[in-house]
Image: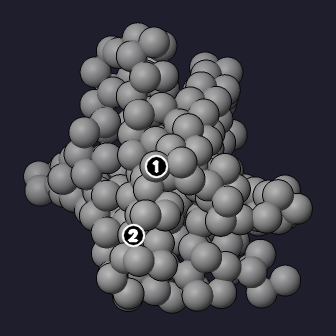
Amino acid sequence: MKKYVAELFGTFWLVFGGCGSAIFAARYPELGIGFVGVSLAFGLTVLTMAYAVGHISGGHFNPAVSFGLWAGGKFSAKELVPYIISQLIGAVLAAAALYFIISGKSDFTDIGGFASNGYGELSPGGYSMTAAFVAEFLLTMFFLLIILGSTNERAPKGFAPIAIGLGLTLIHLISIPITNTSVNPARSMSQALFAGGEYLTQSWLFWVAPIAGALVAGLLHKVFFDKE
């Protein structure tokens, strides 16, 4: 149970901190944190919670990470469903907290995109479904390679959360204009549930592409990088 609670809290912090920075601070009237600030926020959420609870659950905070670690032989298949449920609960609770806060603004009318992910007309830069799929697939694949490599028994000890957090920061720096950056189905699902409409109908891509990329990364690491 401690593992599942750790995953819930870690995913809550990722969504609350990362999506919260995009909702509240990215375009603040005169001085916002912009893409760079949001990218750092997502990276810092993972870095801080990896140190806080990573020793309890492994610090996945992302269904794609759980699938990738399973494919790489680092995670038990029987734990996949309870981990993903815990991650989804944490993400939805964070989205609910964000909704409660934003609805308390004096001039609140609606939540808009709510930091949701999308392609086509819902892409910040107008990128197509194919472009979005390729981006999410590749970025998640490399994210898992970073995770699997930095946590390998032959890697320097104690630095994995830094590499992983900076890796997620870089991923956001690349892809916020493309899809608003997912690489995490729980993060995408929680925001889409509140934004609704096309954001929800497009959410399939942000399950399929990240999980596919993660599975490929797990197999690549197992075959080429796990052992000398």
Discs 2, 1 touching: Cβ within 8 Å: no
Residue for point 56% across, 53% down: 222
Q: Secondary structure at mark 1?
A: helix
The residue singled out by tag 2 in the image is 150
Callout 1, which amino acid?
Answer: Phe
Quarter of the image containing the N terminus?
bottom right
Quarter of the image containing the C terminus?
bottom left
Q: Residue 137 in the image: state x and y as whole percent.
A: 48, 32
Q: Residue 118 in the image: state x and y as whole percent.
A: 48, 26
In the image, 163 versus 90, the foreground residue is 163
Quadrant in the picture for residue 57: bottom right
Residue for point 61% across, 76% down: 58
Q: Is 197 placed left or right of 174 in the picture?
A: right
Whether residue 64 is visible here, answered yes or no, is: yes
The residue singled out by tag 1 in the image is 224
Q: Is 156 placed left or right of 153 in the picture?
A: left
In the image, 63 versus 194, the foreground residue is 63
Quadrant in the picture for residue 122: top left
Within 10 Å of disc 1 (Cα), the crowding (few <14, some 14-19, many 20+) is few
Q: Secondary structure at mark 2?
A: helix
Q: Say which label, 2 or 1, has the lower sequence index.
A: 2
Q: Residue 213 in the image: state x and y as whole percent.
A: 53, 37
The dot on residue 143 is: none
Q: Is residue 206 above or below residue 219?
A: above
- State the separation of the CA atoms marked 2 and 1: 15 Å
Callout 2, which amino acid?
Answer: Ser
Residue for point 41% across, 77% down: 154
Quadrant in the picture for residue 38: bottom left
